[in-house]
Amino acid sequence: MDKQRAFYLDSSACSGCKTCQVACKDKNDLALGIRWRRVYEITGGDWEQKGDSWVSKVSSYFLSMSCNHCANPICLTSCPTEAIVKRDDGIVIIDPERCMGCRYCKWACPYGAMQFDKQKGQMGKCDFCFDYLDEGKEPSCVAACPMRALDFGTMDELKEKYGIDKTIYPLPDPEICNPSLLITPHKNADTDSYEIENREEVQNG
Amino acid sequence: MRIPILMKLKTERRYKMVKHIWPLVFFTIISQMAAGGYLFLKISRFVPVLMPFPESSVKRMLTILLIMASAALFISFSHLGTPKNAIFALCNFRSSWLSREVFFMAAFVGILLFETVFYRWISNSAFLSGTIALLGILILSSFLFSMAKIYQLETLPSWNNNYTLLNFYCTALLAGIVLLIILNPIKIQGNINSLLLTTIAFMIIQMILFVGYSPATGSWKTIGIILYGILLLTVKLQLIKVIPQNTVASLVLIIFLTFAIIIERYLFYASYQNVGV
């Protein structure tokens, strides 16, 4: 889809400061425990003894993740009430007039995008700040990032600008949902070369 | 160029289930119990040797199954965050297995209600009772299939296998048979044996599935295996009449079976694992 909106993340520049996470919470007035954008820290490796000294082989990197507004959203096909819709510009949104809060989409989504709001009894997620886009502004997370690690645009624009199409741990096979997300991986993202120490922390958010 | 992702499934973990899943545990168990009972009733119409119960008890059984199915439906609403929007749950029949499950559940309650209300009229017509039986088998099979398919998503590796499907069908039929036994006082000696033999067969299948294919591990799984072992022994002893074939024994049987099924279903939900984050 030519107009498919997408996010770009430069994981090599991300410092894990969580400003994007806070900006999103502030803009959307999210309740405690709900994070439409989440920053994950992936760590691993160990210290290696060389003679009398110890050399650090510890590796870590950060991943800032929101909804990826997938080209084939599994949440949309799973939702029984058709509360999840995909706009012409590719942004996936939830219709609060139809959502019954069954949380099935939360099970289906492999990116942890779906968040259940106990107060409203319904699901919520990143909506790409489409109201800001209509005013010609950037999404709040992109505007807030001090490292300029986040960017947005159409999928074609981002591919032309960054030329990157990679997926890194802990993200799943992109063939499942075709996420509208491009990532420049951190140099430590080659997780085959070391043991990740905080898998449970990462997978439980 | 896409880098393939290596995701290791955890095989040793502490199982913990969130509170809002408990209504689903009881919804699936009660609805499967009622579905299995109804399915077995309808199948036995074509295979009479499986149905040693007098015709006079069928309406009472149907009424109880209707109450159970309605209770299950009511329980499922308590899982929802916004129940008032549940009226839209049938909208995505095209692609959502949850939508299909809701449809077939409603059809199940509908057919039970119809048959209970018009029982005398239906039972007097061989054509009508045969048609209802075939329709009932179709609806219930579709209901159980839809229910299992809900969990067989590509993003849920611990549930996306044939164990889920087999387990749901087996639980339904096993629980259904035992429910039918308890609903009918045994008046004629020996007639229950065919049902007990069928129960043993399903229990063996269920144990093999639970031991060999369930993603669960740990002490709760061991407890579940022990319970199924005790149940198997109890039914066998009842078959050879070491334990009397009476209502009290059947009541104890269904209580233990219900515990075993609850443990198994708890472990199923607690083994939830999603690819990605």
Image (spheres, rainbow, N blue to C red):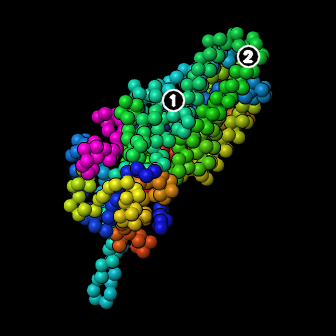
Residue visible at 33% across and 44% down in the picture = A127
Residue appearing at x 35%, y 35% in the figure: A122
Is there any visible trace of residue A54 in the rendered image?
Answer: yes
Q: Relative to residue B145, is residue B211 depicted above or below?
A: below
Residue sitting at 61 percent across and 20 percent down? B112
The mark lying in front, picked from 2 and 1, is 1
Q: Nearer the viewer, residue A144 or A154?
A: A154
Label 1 neighbour load within 10 Å: few <14, some 14-19, many 20+: many
The answer to whether B200 is drawn above or below residue A52 in the figure is above
Query: Which residue position is annotated with label 2?
Result: B128
Tell me the SS state at disc 1: helix
Q: Which residues are magenta?
A: A116-139
Amino acid type, residue under disc 1 in the picture: Leu
Could you say which is closer to the camera, residue B272 or residue B228?
B272
* Sooner in the amino-acid sequence: mark 2 or mark 1: 1
Magenta stretch: includes residue A14: no
* Residue in the foreground of this view, choosing between B46 and A177: A177
Percent coordinates x, y for residue B109 in the rendering: 57, 22
Q: Chain of mark 2?
A: B
Q: Which residue is mark 1?
A: B90
Among the 4 quarters of the image, the one containing residue B64: top right
Q: CA distance from mark 2 to mark 1?
A: 28 Å
Pointer 1 indicates a residue of which chain? B
Q: Is residue A202 left or right of residue B194?
A: left
